[in-house]
Structure formats: C-alpha cells, structure tokens
Image (tube, helix red, strand yellow):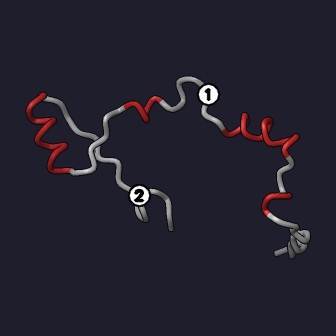
Amino acid sequence: MPQLPPPPASPGAADQCPATKFAARHALVKPAAGEDRWASIPWQTSLWEARQEAAKAGKPIVLWEMDGHPLGCV
C-alpha cells in the first residue's frame, strides 16, 4: 500500500477558508430547494407517542434509527 504524504502544515481553522471563497463553498454544500423537505416533517422523538399518533390517524410510522448522539456530537 503506498504511503500518503503528510498533510501540509495547517495554520489556524479561521485561515483555512478565506472569506473570498466561503460563499462559493457554502453554496456547494447548502441543500438546494426541495432537498431538505424531510426537515418539514413533524418528527417524534418518542416511539410510543409516534405509535399512538399513527394509530389514531390510521397511518404507518417510519423509524429513523442511528447509532451515536442524535445531534451528531460524537
């Protein structure tokens, strides 16, 4: 397996993305219209409450499960 070269010396985090390039980089990662519709769903954090609400409405539930901290703080 080839060796990767060491990363270049890093100044500070604030210096890594100059203000002149930030807007272009931000546009690359910002969700486009329609890509974040999942955020408009009234998600429940309690499976039991979601089950009760779904039963009243006669609708199924979607269980979105992941490992780790729910806010991504791992």
First in residue order: circle 1 vs circle 2: 1
Q: Residue at x 11, y 41 (%)?
A: 52
Q: Quadrant of the N terminus?
A: bottom right
Amino acid under disc 1: Ala
Q: Residue at x 87, y 70 (%)?
A: 7
- Distance (Cα) linking label 1 and label 2: 24 Å
Q: Quadrant of residue 22?
A: top right
Q: Which residue is mark 1?
A: 32
Question: Left of 65 or right of it: where is 57?
Answer: left
User: Can you give x and y, in whole percent of width and height, for residue 67 in the image?
Assistant: 41, 63
Amino acid under disc 2: Pro
Q: Residue at x 88, y 74 (%)?
A: 6
Secondary structure beneath dot 1 equals loop
Q: Which residue is mark 2?
A: 70
Question: Left of 38 or right of it: where is 7?
Answer: right
The disc placed on residue 44 is none
14 up-or-down from 24: above or below? below
- Mark 1, Cα crowd under 10 Å, few <14 / some 14-19 / many 20+, is few
Q: Residue at x 57, y 23 (%)?
A: 33
Q: Quadrant of residue 24?
A: top right
Q: Quadrant of residue 66?
A: bottom left
Residue farthest along the top direction in this orientation: 33
6 up-or-down from 54: above or below? below
User: Can you give x and y, in whole percent of width and height, for residue 23 in the image?
Assistant: 78, 36
